[in-house]
Every structure is written in structure tokens, then in C-alpha cells.
Amino acid sequence: MTVLPYLVAGWILLAGLYGLVTSRNLVQAVGCLAVAQSSTYVLLLAVGYRRDATAPVFSDLPTDAPVVDPVVQALALTDIVVGATVTALLLSLVIQLRKRHGTVDPEELTGLRG
Amino acid sequence: MDTADLLPLAVAVPLLGAAVVAVAGRWLPRPGRDALATACAAADVGCLALLWARTDPDGRAVSWLGGWRPRGGHGVGIVLVADRLGSGLALLAAVLVLAVLCYAWRYFDEPSGEHGGMFPGLLLLFQAGMCGFALTGDLFDAFVFFELMGAVAYALTGYRIEDPRPLQGALAFGLVNSAAAYLSLLGIGLLYARTGELGMAQIGAALDERAAAGHGRDALVVVAFVLVLAGPLVKAATAPFHFWLPDAHAVAPSPVCMLLSGVMVELGVYGVARIHRVVFAGAGGLPDAAVRDTLLAAGVLTALVGAVMCWQQRHLKRMLAFSTVGHVGLFLVGTALLTPAGLAGSAVYVAGHAGAKAALFGLTGVLLDRYGSVDEHGLHGRARELRLPGALFALGALALAGLPPFGTGLGKAVAEEAAGRELGWLPAVFVLVSALTGGAVLRAGLRVFGGVGSPPKEHPEVAATTGEGEEPEIRGPGRRLPAPMIAVPAALLAGCLAVGLAPGVGRALAAAAAAFTDRTGYLADTLGGTAPAATPAPDTDWTASGILLGLLSAALAAAFATAAVRRDPRRGTGALHRATVLPLRRLHSGLLGDYVAWLAVGLAALLVALVAQL
């Protein structure tokens, strides 16, 4: 098992967080959150990976065939559903903010401070 | 019906209720919608009360969903586990949701037609998320319920989409909380990679087995600990992860604030305690001393930041939000002691605080309803006509300060005593934080409802959130004040009083806290095995020193408040204030990027602090 996928997951996470910190556009910030989240997909799939194994669908496989871990795939699927919900909700808030406030730049939203 | 069947039912009832209310709300008239939602919430309260009553004080109800029990020592299914602390917290959430539904009966001018059932439906969905998070025994499930609770809370915060500020608060809330939730998921992935399990009990047992076989704790376990706790710590608004909370609370509709402050934030502390206790408190986890010291430091920092910032606010809801930050810091201190007594104190404190804080938010909703403002300076003396709400507001402020015999006073006394045994100066933090937060709220009450003192001078050079120009949450200001908007806060305050006065409540929570800290018992009940002897419950009766310290903090709060309203408004601020408080206020910049940066910095600090102690 190579350590490369874990490093990739960490890199994607840091890239997403860096984007969140520096973003000047809320649509982009929500996108960065989705990027940070995709590091969890990479990590989960890397955890369940087995060399020379195939997808865990047994309809046309012998029952002793080597397959990758199906649990992490279920987790990644659930994770995608959760992520899609959150991203859609946040984007709808951004759209509404653009309509009401006329801006999507977080630096111009100074109604709440101190 | 078996006790274990109540566990999935407690989550399913509000979940199904939300769907029914959302669909039926399209054609039902408003009273019908409200009755339906209230009936669902009441049914959930009944279900959880039954669960609480039928769980042994030192036992647990365990439900393997779909009958997928562990085979050969490996978990293949998902488990719900309720000990009395978990079901008690779920019950508290259910009671508050019921109270909020009653409070909101006449609160909003709700849109009819297609979106008619949205608000009560979202509240029920929120209840399902909170209940599931409190009852789950599975780490991945905890993540899913965390996100369900989170997503509904973002939507409820930004419910008034005509106004830009709720949207801004909801976005900061959503981005920071969801980013933290994904960090938690990374930690869960690491733990799964190490142990091949997702259940908390199974992971804990597997880590212990590895430690027994000579593969002790390593960097992966420490990193996983920090990552997994990121979500609950952010939800619990631990400094420096607390920035989202005042922004979200300042703008969310008042009924929603009652839930966010009353129980959702406290669920974060519960998550920290549960995950640490079951997964990481064994031989394969982290040493108790390192975790205790780190969390104690975080709790004290949170409490002080919350108290100081609370005193500085003039926006009433933001003030109450910072008071929540301060109190959650105290709950974290009590929990971080890792003793049954500290946890029992926090549990009683949470129950009392939920009543007092929800009542105060409810009364602030009355101000918003009447005057369209929640600004302490702008409302100076305008609410003199509201006698009963004013009296309740002052009582709530004193309860917040820990005045005996309120439940907050009892919880503070028990936690204080437990903390004092660990570090002699910790009770001083409890007294100071309760006095400052209670004093700030009392000051606002004196000014707004009593018109005491002269109106404060404006300081436009200081960046501050005023409470002026709020969109009233309802239309038609000429109407009479709806009865539930006074009755519900009064009932909540009475509940806070009952927690302190009824000796059964404190004792039951003490026994629950003792069972919560019994890790071997949790593992044995969940995975099968021999149940060891139960830990004796700590004492949670009133003591003379507890009453005296409670009276002291209430007296200090009153002194702070009167000194502030009598202060000459022309006097400037001192050098100490300019050197310490103003920079702290500037940190609360309202900028999303800063909040995420603080999240990263805080987690790095947590990791360094833990590693340095190993």
C-alpha cells in the first residue's frame, strides 16, 4: 500500500481550506468547501483499496473473488449525498444574498462584527 | 414494546412528522399545520420520556438496526445506544422543540400554500437530527446526524431570506460547520483504516486490543482524535472556533435562537465527551491527563472570551449568543474534568441554562415584535410598558448569573466544586463568567425595560453590531401580544427553577453522569460481555458553599449592571480596555476567511498541545 493517496487527500484538503480563507467570491468559497470535502472521498477510497481486486459486485463474480472494501464505498456515497445537500443549500443562500445585497464578496459583508 | 424499539422510534417520529407536515401543509390551514407539528413533537417527547424512564440509571438501551448484530467480534451493523445522559439530552431537545413550536404558533406571518408547512417541518427535522446525534453509537452515523442537524440549522438561520444579514450569518455558520464536519469525517476514515470498525464501542475495543498486543498509540490515533473532535468542538463554539455562533444567533429568528443556544451548541460538548470517553479513553487512546489539561485550557479560554465579549454587546441577541459562548466554556470545563462529579455539574447546568437562555431569547423576540429593534441603546426606556416581560427578563438574567435556587445555580455549584478539587482557581472563573454574562443581560434589562440611567454615548469609532433596523419578524405591529410569547418563556423559567428545586432531577442526572463515565459498562452493554460494578453517583445536593458562591455571582452581576447604568456616559474608556478588549473585538471581524483560518490555527494548536504532553 502506497502512501501517495493519503498525501493527495491531505493536499486537496489544504488546497480547499486555503481557497476558503482567501476567497473573495462566495460562490467560489462554496466550491472550495466542496474541494475540501473531496479529500474525504480520496481518503475513504484509499482506505478500502486492495491491489488486484475488483468492484464489490458479486452478480458475476465467484464469492471468493478479491474485492475492494464495500463499506468505504457506501460511506463515500453517503458523503456525496450529504455534500450535495449542503452545497446546494449554501449556493441558494449565496444567490439570495446576491439578489438582496448585490454582492458576493465576503469582504463587503460587514453587517456583523465586534 | 421493547425498550430498545423506542430508540429508532425517537428519531423516526420527528423525521416522518416533518415529511407529513411539509406535504400536508400545502392544503391545511395554519391552525391545522401547527396542531399537526405540535402533536408530532409531543409524541416525540412522550417517546423519549418513556425511554428515559425505562432505561436503568446505570444501564443502557441498545438497538442494532435491522437486527445486524456483531458477528465474530466484528460489527456489521449500525447501533443506537441510549444511556440516561444521551436520552436525557434528546429529551431536553424534544421539550425545547415543543416549546418553540408553541411559541411560534402566532409568531411568523407564514406564507400559505406551497411553503406553508416549511417552518414547523424544518423544526421537526432539526429535532430528528439532534435526537439521532444524541442517541447514536456509531461514529459515521454521528457525522450524518451532525450534518443533518447542521444543514437544517443553516436553513433555519437564513429563514428570513428577504433580509441580507440572516443570509450572511447562515453562510458563515454553514461554511465553518460543514468544513469542520468534513475534517471529522477524515478522522473517522483514519480510525476505520486502523481498526476496520465504525461503531464507537467497536473502535474503542479494537484500539484497546491493539494496545494490549503491544501496538500502542501512535501519531495516527492522535491526529484522528484531533480531526474527529473538530466537528463537535466547532459546534460547541469552543474558542477559537466560536466566531460563527454570534453571527448566526444575532440574525436567526428568535424561536430558532432558542433551540440553537438552548440545546444544539450543548450537543457539541456532549459529542466531545461521548467520543472521547468511548473511543479514546482506553489503553489504546490518549492519556486522561493530556486530554483533561488541553480541554480545560480550551474551556477556560472559551468562557473568558464569551464573558468579555458578552459585556461589550449592545445587540441583545448577539449579547445572549456570547453569553452562550461563555457558558458553553463552563460546560466544557466541567466535562473536561473527566470525573462523574464534573460531568454531573455540567449536565444540571445544561438543563438549567437551556430553560433560562431559551426564555431570554423568547423575551427578546417580544421586543423585536413590539419595537422592531433589539438594540440596547436604541430601546432605552421604551419597553417600560411591558411589565411582566421585563420582570421575567430580569429573573432570566439572574438565573444566568447562577442565583440559587435556579437550576443554573445548582449546576454551577456542583461543577464549581468538582473543578475546585482539580484546580483551586477554577471556581473563580465560574463566578466571574456567570457574573459578567448575567450582569450584561441585567444591564440591558434595566435600560430597556426600566429606563434606568442616561442613554449611553455612541462610539462610532468602535466596530460594533447594533440592533437597529432589524426587519420585524412579524407584520402588523398593532396587534395584541400573543399569549404563548409570554407563557412559553415563563414556563421555561419555571423549568429552570424546577431543575434546581426538585432534588430528583439533580440526583437522576448525577447517576446518569456516573453511568456515562463508565466506559467498560458501555462497551459490555453494546458488544456483549460482563457488566462490571457501577460507579457510585456523585452528590448533587445544594451545599452551603455552592449557595454562597451562587449568591456572590448574582450579587456581582447586579453590582456590574447598576455600575454600568449609573456610569457617566461622557467618561472615556481606560487604557486596559483599549489594550485588551478592543483587539479582541476586532478579531470578531465578520469575515468568513478569518473564521476558517482560525479553525485551522486552532486545530493545529490542539494537536501541538496534545503531542507536547505525550
Image: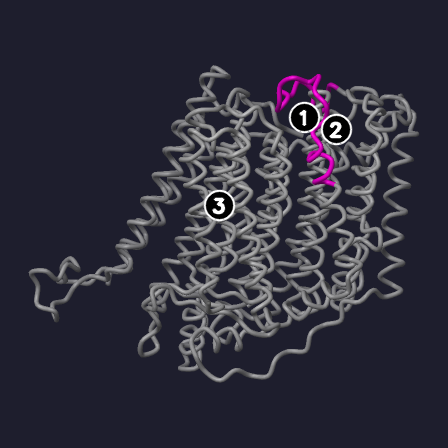
User: Closer to the observer: label 3 or label 1?
Assistant: 3
Residue B103 or residue B562, whichever sits in front = B103
Of the numbered discs 1 and 2, the one sitting upstream in the chain is 2
Q: From this view, report whether residue B583 is shown above or below residue B187.
A: above
The type of residue carrying mark 1 is: Thr
Q: Secondary structure at mark 1?
A: loop
User: Closer to the observer: label 3 or label 2?
Assistant: 3
Real-space Cα separation, disc 1 to disc 2, in angstroms: 7 Å
Residue B409 placement: quadrant: bottom right
Residue wearing tag 2: B314
Residue B318 or residue B104, whichever sits in front = B104
Q: From this view, report whether residue B169 is shown above or below residue B240.
A: above
Label disc, if present, on residue B149 of the rendered structure: 3
Of the numbered discs 3 and 1, the one sitting upstream in the chain is 3
Real-space Cα separation, disc 3 to disc 2, in angstroms: 29 Å
* Residue B584 visible from this viewpoint: no
The type of residue carrying mark 3 is: Met
Q: Is residue B310 left or right of residue B557?
A: left
Q: Name the outermost residue toward the top.
A: A102
Marks 1 and 2 close (CB-CB < 8 Å): yes
Tell me the magenta residue range.
B460-489
